[in-house]
Image (cartoon, rainbow, N blue to C red):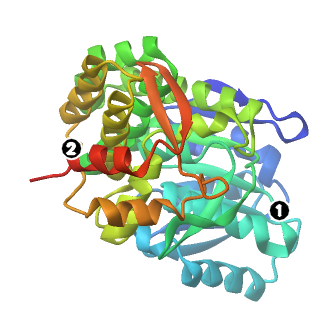
Amino acid sequence: METVRVGLGSRAYPIYVGAGVLEDGRLYAPHVAGRRAAVITNEVVAPLYLERLGRTLAAAGAQVTTIVLPDGEQTKDWTSLARIVDRLLEERFGRDAIVVALGGGVIGDLAGFAAAIYQRGVPFLQVPTTLLAQVDSSVGGKTGINHPRGKNMIGAFHQPLAVISDTAVLSTLPERELGAGLAEVIKHGFALDAEFALWLEANLERLLRRDAAALMHAVRRSCELKAAIVAQDERESGSRALLNFGHTFGHAIEAAQGYGAWLHGEAVAAGMAIAAALSVRLGLLEPGEATRLTAILRRAGLPVANPRIAPERLLELMRSDKKTERGRLRFVLLTATGKAQVVADPGDDQVIAAITACTST
């Protein structure tokens, strides 16, 4: 097991990464002993890991209640949020209770938001079971639900007490979910760390065949990169925006298609390809560097094109994005592999041209 620390002063917390940590009671006991714990998960994860986690929490001194929700991005809505809150109230959970999120990014975001708003905030733990959640969504305290007009438009910053990432559970991950997680890993390399990007290019096949050592390195390094930025900019007023590389376009694609048509990582992959094309059009990035990015995305089996959504429609949806500032669109673009910057208002014509150039025919 390795530990990465998110340095946020009194709200600092550890990220535990390793095979078998799902059932390591020592990691849970400091947070759950003597508490009521609500484990929130979904119908896919529950048969695989809920019983094992429940036993571990009970042995660590928790009184466990479980809430099992449907699977899929469409679950991240008001209805599911209300279902969680209703159950917590029905079971008379107090402010001394704890929420435990067992699942991927949808469950982590949803359970974290419920914890943030229930009785004005109760603590929670992240136990991510997908690669995407382990390398990205479980770290940093972003919680929320979707709205038909935009992804993650309703939410709160609410940091977990700890993140417990068991890399062994990735063995049960469907191929498509693995690829979606790799999109966020690739994002970290190409936006933040050129050396990591080189490592990914050399080791992608090991990751695709789920080599344990390669997965461990990818998860740990992604967490290190994200933790360092979150520690500098918890609420995304500055450098944390760089973590949104590919997300402005990606979120618009998800909203336009309907949540769940593409996995989040698939939409981000296409979004990164479009963002790289826009970077080239604006003279920020050499064309060969954009080709490097699209090449590794293709090798990971990820989409690199807008799925025939009208560019004007995507532009309309992006204007509702959280990253819009004073009515001006802001994009995270590349200047080189491993280096990104925020560019405000590059011009609608340039954005539409980049989308058009990356639209499926």
* Residue 227 versus residue 160 in the image, above or below: above
Helix, strand or loop at disc 2? helix
Residue annotated with mark 2: 357
* Residue 74 versus residue 342 in the image, above or below: below
Query: Which residue in the rendered view is the most extreme toward the left?
Result: 361
Crowding near pointer 2: few (<14 within 10 Å), some, many (20+)? some
Q: Nearer the viewer, residue 258 or 121?
A: 258
**Which residue is at a point 73% across and 49% down the rendered structure image?**
160
**Which residue is at a point 54% across and 36% down the rendered structure image?**
343
Crowding near pointer 1: few (<14 within 10 Å), some, many (20+)? many
Residue annotated with mark 1: 35
Q: Mark 1 or mark 2, which has the lower sequence index? A: 1
Residue 311, percent from left and from top = 30, 59
Residue 250, percent from left and from top = 39, 52
Q: Nearer the viewer, residue 129 or 263?
A: 263
Helix, strand or loop at disc 1? loop
